[in-house]
Amino acid sequence: MGGVMSDFVPGIELSRAFYAEVVAPLVGGVPHSAALIGPGSEVLAFDTGRSADHDWGPRVLVFAEPDAVEAVEAKVVAGLPGRFRGFATVFDYHGVVRPGVEVADLGVWLEGRLGFDPGGGGISLLDWLSVPWQCLAEVTGGEVFHDGLGRLEAVRAALRWYPDDVWRYVLACQWRRIAQEESFPGRCGEVGDEPGSAVVGARLVREVMRLALLLRRRYPPYAKWLGSALARLPGSAELGESLGMALAARSWRDRERGLAAAYGRVAAMQNRMALAERLDERVRGFHDRPFQVIGGDRFVRALLESVSDPRVRGLPLVGSVDQLSDSADLLLAPSRARAVTAAALGLGA
């Protein structure tokens, strides 16, 4: 496997060297782009020594012109050494044994990952909302080692973040998810259902984490890396402490206090971003009941009022595909994710 965990070299560094020392000399005479993007914990720099036990090693994506893909692939396969810095260059990746170098046409690869080619005529509203955050992070993350085709960096720049109105809409939908359940931890606890209160409280913690990342222009990664991504967010320590308090609470009142503190922090974050009308960041009572809530729908309305595009403002408050479903079998199938999003939002597929 190559070394022990204490000797771990991040995958992005390994792959950068692999391209420079092995792959570039093999394809140097052919116009191409090369990168480490797409799936894999190393793309988002979340890999550790533990990652090296499967689906991990020196990897490079090489993009060539459509009529050159087969020839470049044959050249790479013929010249690839068996090992690089102690790691096999052909390995089991998600159950399929293949070389660590994948050669593809950029447009075809993007269609397979996103469900559309951003360089093929712009990015539609459905395009933006039907691609999971994890996939957007994977395409815009990682590193481009060489862009001889001159298209890869442009595609990544176009996908770097939502257009402003789409961003406000997605944020509004994220606040709506909080608004729908923010009184439930207290209500469950009041009737003696502490397990139910804890479950709903944990759901709300996840929604706040995602909201914080979205407010700071970060695509939230999937569940395994969500906490790690939040911890990397500058200035997130106090928010993390509040969320930790909510998760560790043994009573609904302590859980509510942790959540209330977290709500106030993301509300303040939105006010600082000046995305919409400035709103009171304090929690308040939920009708005449003894529960403290932020009143998430206040933030929903304010954000929607700041949207200028009538098409976006008129969308139902269900959001992007990540806000529609948690199913990996849906999110990892671009055609399925696109169809579900189109149906839910009333957008043509």
Image (spheres, helix red, strand yellow):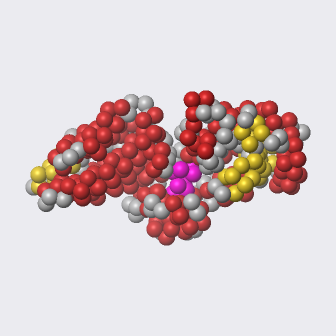
Q: Is residue 108 left or right of residue 125?
A: right
Magenta region: which residues?
Answer: 128-136
Q: Is residue 278 left or right of residue 35?
A: left
Q: Residue at x 45, y 62 (%)?
A: 325
Look at the image and say whether residue 27 sits in the magenta stretch. no
Q: Is residue 50 left or right of residue 17?
A: left
Whether residue 96 is visible, yes or no, is: yes
Residue 45 is drawn in which quadrant?
Answer: top right
Image height check: is 24 above or below 187?
A: above
Whether residue 117 is visible, yes or no, is: no
Q: Residue at x 28, y 55 (%)?
A: 200
Q: Position of residue 122 (x, y in %)?
A: 64, 53
Q: Position of residue 349 (x, y in %)?
A: 57, 68
Q: Position of residue 341 (x, y in %)?
A: 50, 65
Front residue of 9 and 306:
9
Front residue of 123 and 85:
85
